Image (tube, rainbow, N blue to C red):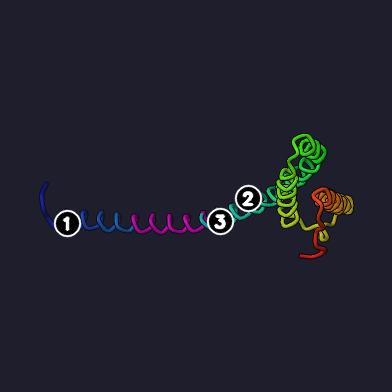
Amino acid sequence: MKKGPKNDKAIRFLMISLVGITVLVIGLFALLSGYMNKKSTETIEEVGKLYMTGMNEQIVMHYETVIELRLSQVQAIIDTVYEEIAPHKICAYIYDAANAFNKFYHETRILAEEDAEKKAGYIALLKLTKEVLETCIDLLGFEAPERM
């Protein structure tokens, strides 16, 4: 190739064009990246809210189920204690049932529940748990404090 004034101008034009296009493309990618990042953040937040709402409902259902299972085991525990003369099993049962209820109580807004039927169910579960725990404590021969 010959070097000359025309050739230098053409190379200079191509270089400036290449730099210009590169800057334009980088700017465009930066704008698109910012837009995509904003959209993905909003989408992630929306998905997170939906997920956590579903998780809270699942947690409440899980704790309700655990409490109901623990309460349904009372008769079997009492029978086992009687047959094996093992009162420590009542203590273990009380501990497990109280822990399950405590988790449920902290994860569930019982009095703030808007659904009246659900709220009544929660209160019934509260009363049943209290009665079962009191009965188990009575079987052990001591009294539970009114307040902690």
Asked if one can make out residue 122 in the rendered structure from this viewpoint, the answer is no
Q: Is residue 124 left or right of residue 51?
A: right
**x then y, percent, for residue 29:** 43, 54
Tag 3: amino acid = Thr
Tag 1: amino acid = Asp
Q: Main secondary structure of the magenta part?
A: helix
Residue ID for mark 3? 41
Helix, strand or loop for disc 3? helix
Helix, strand or loop for disc 2? helix
Disc 3 crowd rating (10 Å Cα; few below 14, some 14-19, many 20+) is: few
Q: Alpha-carbon distance for marks 1 and 2? A: 57 Å
User: Which quadrant of the rendered structure holds the C terminus?
Assistant: bottom right
Residue ID for mark 2? 47
Identify the disc placed on residue 61.
none
Magenta residues (range): 21-36
- From the viewer's perspective, is residue 102 above or below residue 74? below
- Please say if the residues under marks 1 and 3 sit with CB atoms less than 8 Å apart: no
